[in-house]
Image (spheres, rainbow, N blue to C red):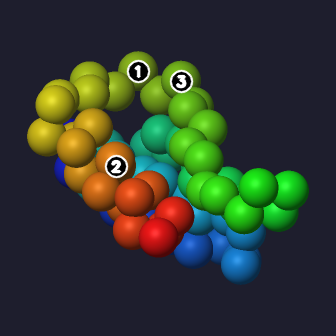
Amino acid sequence: MNLDINPIDDYTIEVYSANTDKLVGKILHQEFDNLWYFLYSDCGCVWSSDVLYELAEILDNLNK
């Protein structure tokens, strides 16, 4: 599985599986601590370590 991201607005980014086009979750910005968090959606997708690393890199870059 590879990830595709789709920004919705300044506080929401949808994350899709590039292989199945299913929504795998959302990245949400929380104003109270000014950080971005991933909210998982049960898509039935298989998460490899490479995909988890890719998601972690996205979150790390957003939270810099």
Q: Secondary structure at mark 3?
A: loop
Marks 2 and 1, the one that precedes in the sequence:
1
The residue tagged 1 is 44
Q: Are marks 2 and 1 in contact (CB under 8 Å)?
A: no
Q: Does residue 19 appear left or right of residue 31 in this picture?
A: left
Q: Quadrant of the N terminus?
A: top left
At 44% from the left and 56% from the top, the residue drawn is 59
Q: How much space separates mark 1 and mark 3, taking CA atoms? A: 6 Å
Between disc 2 and disc 3, the foreground one is 2
Q: Position of residue 17 (x, y in %)?
A: 34, 47
Q: Which residue is mark 2?
A: 55
Query: Residue type at mark 1?
Result: Gly
Which quadrant would residue 44 be assigned to in this image?
A: top left
Is residue 50 shown above or below 47? below
Q: Residues within 10 Å of mark 1 (few under 14, many from 20)?
A: few
Q: Amino acid at mark 3?
A: Asp
**Quadrant of the rendered structure where residue 5 is?**
bottom left
- Tell me the crowding category of disc 2: few under 14, some 14 to 19, or many 20 or more residues within 10 angstroms, Cα based: some
Q: Cβ–Cβ below 8 Å for labels 1 and 3?
A: yes
Type of amino acid at the residue the image marks with label 2: Leu
Q: Is residue 24 above or below residue 6?
A: above
Q: Secondary structure at mark 2?
A: helix
The residue carrying mark 3 is 42
Earlier sequence position, callout 2 versus callout 3? 3
Percent from the top left, x then y, of residue 20? 31, 44
